[in-house]
Amino acid sequence: MSTKKRILFFTKDLNRTGAEIILFNIVESLDRSKFDIGIVLMQQRGELIPNLPKDIKLFYLESTFNLFDKIRFHLGEDVMLNRLKRIEREFKSDIWYINTITNAGVLKYSNQFSVFKFLHIHENLFGIGHLSLTDTEIILNQVDHYIACSDIIYNQLKSITQKPCTTITSCIDKNFIDSCSTKLKKPSKNKIKIIGSGTICQVKGVEIFVEISKLFDPAQYEFVWIGNWSKTGYSEVLRRNINSIKNPAIEIKNNLSPLEYIQEINSADLFLSCSREESMGLVMMEAIYCGVPVLATDSGGSSLIITDQNGKICFDLRPEVLANEVRTLIENRNQFDLLTMRKSIERYDGPLEIQKLEIILSKI
């Protein structure tokens, strides 16, 4: 009989967002002599899916109801529970590992199964105002072991729960960036390039980024935001605001390939993070590893990464103040050395963090 533990990971879609990449690196690296791995996707898509190791079983948990489902639901059947039971009959998991609070809704069904439950939290706990009290109580009561993406999240958890909690620090995939470097084209440009990145939402402060871009001459500067539009009123208002600018210095780029993304970061003169809150800030780390200095707002996660060796933190969200800081850093950008910048984040070691996690999983 196999003594391997069977881990079922729950995640959104395996697109190249920070939390999804972290989970991809975990499942790719775990020792197959100790673990059998399955992944449950909440959405049927994802750029990373074709790159998954072939031994991973992939499931899809449909969250929408067709007419037949609705009839069965009104007749008293718990449709979602039955969908999970079908997955469990096939996989027979020992551990549920839920990636992000966004996917934690499955926890309300977890007591129907004999599983140990991990929740890997990538979000700032004080930024989850969209959750109901009921959902929050499920997260705090049904989890057996919390995984925090940074010491910031660990400290938040330890102040509200006595349950086991471990920091597995989120890290970038340095090997992937290195592999891209051999394929990068040398950019030809005649403007100073300022880059921002992340899903277009209020938390990322994209509207601040846009306001800053208005304070620069578009003949000399270009501002590029890399990220997908969220399906929110915020995105629509921002889109219309950008379209109203007569001579914009800003461009929004989305649906980039992983190589194109690194190309954009690598071609920047400065990375500008306007986030209102960050639990870690992996895009800042990616920029630093590419040798691009970072100007970041005081978002929490920025304090874990930014030093005078790789950039600066600004404690003021006013666009005029941030614009002056941009100009200062651009003037002094030659003071930043690539090797020194990389050394400033070398303590964030992805393989070492995954080894820590593997030890925890092995003890369950």
Image (tube, helix red, strand yellow):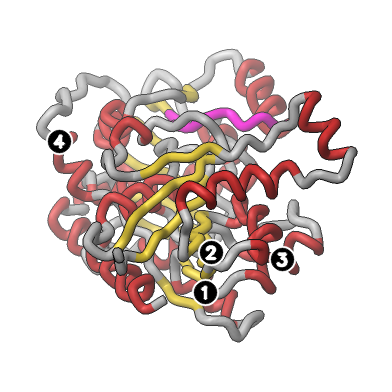
Residue placed at 80% from the left, 57% from the top?
A: 132
User: What kind of element bears circle 4?
Assistant: helix
Between discs 4 and 2, the one toward the N terminus = 2
Disc 3 to disc 2, C-alpha distance: 12 Å
The disc, 3 or 1, on the residue closer to the chain's N-terminal end is: 3
> Is 231 covered by the magenta stretch?
yes
Write down the residue under mark 3.
Answer: 138
At mark 1, the secondary structure is strand
Residue 65, compared with residue 56, is above or below; it is above
Which three-letter amino acid code belongs to the residue tagged 3? Ile
Which residue is pictured at 27% across the width and 39% down the height?
A: 54
Q: Nearer the viewer, residue 134 or 38?
A: 38
Q: Position of residue 98 (x, y in %)?
A: 52, 57
Q: Is residue 124 visible?
A: yes
Quadrant of the image containing the N terminus: bottom left
Q: Badges 2 and 1: C-beta atoms under 8 Å apart?
A: yes
The picture places residue 154, in percent across and down from the top left corner, at 51, 75
Residue 221, position as x, y percentages in the image: 39, 27
Name the residue rendered at 47%, 22% in the picture. 251
* Callout count: 4
Q: Earlier in the sequence, mark 4 or mark 1?
A: 1
Classify mark 3: residues with Cα within 10 Å, few (<14), some (14-19) or many (20+): some
Q: Residue at x 10, y 32 (%)?
A: 182
Tell me the CA gap for discs 3 and 1: 13 Å
Residue with the mark numbered 2: 119
- Tell me which label, 3 or 4, sits earlier in the chain: 3
Residue position marked by numbered label 1 in the rendering = 145
Q: Nearer the viewer, residue 211 or 92?
A: 92
From the viewer's perspective, is 267 left or right of 240? left
- Residue labelled with disc 4: 181
